[in-house]
Amino acid sequence: MDRTQIVIPAADMERQREYTARLAGVLARPDRAPMALVDTYGCQQNVADSQRIMGMLREMGCGFTEDPGRADIIVINTCAIRENAEKKVFGLLGQLTHAKEKNPDVVICLCGCMAQQEVVARKVKASYRHVDLVFGPQALWRFPELLYETVSGRRRVFSIRDEHGSIAEGMPVVRESAVKAWVSIMYGCNNFCSYCIVPYVRGRERSRESAAILAEVRELVEAGYKEITLLGQNVNSYGKDLAEPMDFADLLSEIDKIPGDYLIRFMTSHPKDAGQKLFDTMARCGHVAKQLHLPVQSGNSRVLKEMNRGYTRETYLEKVRYARSVMPELVLTSDIIVGFPGETEAEAMDTLSLIEEVRYDALFTFIFSPRPGTPASRMPDPASRAEKQVWFERILDAQNRISGELHRGYVGRTVRVLVDGESGDPAWPLSSRTNGGRLVHLKGDTALVGQYAGVKIVDSNTWALFGEV
Ligand code: 5AD
Ligand code: SF4
């Protein structure tokens, strides 16, 4: 791929800033600031994208509200990974007809992965006529221009062209906390796992220049951020497309050299591209959390092949063994899909046995959801939903037991945590995370937010630990 076609030229970014300035004039009201509501579904990448949208809205002079009745602009950033996520958004869109009836001037925008799908755009065009602006993840950087067209032209705008995808540097951002920040290091995915919609809606893999990433991390560390999570659909493919190729392990080593008291986390790692070099680098780098989200999806090699995952049960287990040999304290989590088309009960139980063997700290388990346009959606799928539900629950029960056991192992120990916020629960007023990312509900002074603390773990359950400073 030609990099010059991928990185958005500075002049184009400048043009977006001009639209932002114009919008500040158009949206201004005599009595109050215009208000925006940004509602986010799905993964961390969407959360990060929404922070950019909020950054642009703030530069247009907007304040933020969670009340649709008070909003002048509503942005719904959507997820397409499973049907449930889409159903929720259509439900919400239905409810928003009332907001539009009450305030015909409210501008309703639909963006994110759902919006990039043509079937969705068509449905919105025909049946959700109160939605004014629809754009996919590839057009995010042009939000000011698209919003300007919508508002000034008083017409509906749809921007969902199937683009290869680009990289936009220098967009404004509103960070959700002063402690934790997201840094995208790459966008898109080339893997085409047979069940997954992501490669169709987020375009091809493209990496940010390491200099831009390093500058952003350095800035965040200097601003006092303590936990920085590097984001990519598959961070292990980082750098393959750069003029001077650099791999993800090298990027971690470079980031690790930035002085300061902070932790680096990352997600997601594809097992096929995660290797000894990555694990050795994680073990060696003091700023890199000993935490790995390594989605296995299935514990059966035939199913893995049908999923187009590029590894087998055995090669996956071998990687886990090696990672743990160099990082004995590693916190390991995973994603599982139960009921992939053609999966038998015995194959689903192979996933269960893999879970028993690996003993993950936590697991995200999903029942297969056919996504239109993906190869898996066209495969024969004889197992009933009820059968899949039984397998799903067996896996969930096993994992809950394992998580509970692992968490009990922390009780009585003293661990270092980063206090990242207040919980609102008077019994455990603080929330914090261990180096490995386990949640610790904490008793202690709220002045500790943003600081590291040594805490004694006094209790645990399936999902979390409880500690005292
Ligand atoms: N059905 C169910 N789960 C899915 N995932 C991705 N696509 C699907 C699908 N079609 C899960 C995978 C992935 C996680 C983010 O979502 O486990 O790792
Ligand atoms: Fe989807 Fe596979 Fe890409 Fe992950 S690696 S986003 S599961 S296609």
Image (spheres, rainbow, N blue to C red):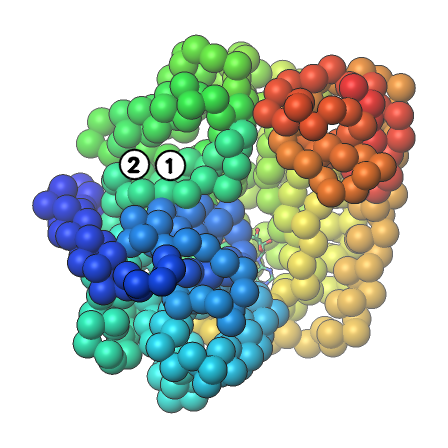
Up the image or down, 25 lies above or below 276; here it is below
- Specify the farthest residue to the bottom: 126
Q: Where residue 255 appears, x then y in whole percent? A: 41, 20
Q: Residue at x 38, y 17 (%)?
A: 254
Up the image or down, 108 lies above or below 418; here it is below
Q: Where residue 467 appears, x then y in whole percent? A: 82, 26
Amino acid of disc 1: Ile
Q: Residue at x 32, y 33 (%)?
A: 239
Q: Where residue 49 appears, x then y in whole percent? A: 40, 50
Q: Quadrant of residue 132?
A: bottom left
Secondary structure of the residue carrying tag 2 is loop
Q: Give the class, few, some or many, for how many residues have Cα within 10 Å of label 2's Cα (few <14, many ≥20).
A: many
Secondary structure of the residue carrying tag 1 is loop
- Specify the farthest residue to the left: 11
Camera-side residue of 27 and 323: 27
Q: Which label number is shown at residue 208?
A: 2
Q: Quadrant of residue 252?
A: top left
Residue at the spot of label 1: 185
Q: Quadrant of the C terminus?
A: top right
Left or right: 145 as drawn, with respect to 114: left
How many numbered marks appear?
Answer: 2
Q: Are marks 2 and 1 in contact (CB under 8 Å)?
A: yes
Left or right: 449 as drawn, with respect to 398: left
Q: Residue at x 25, y 72 (%)?
A: 150
Residue 64 visible at all: yes
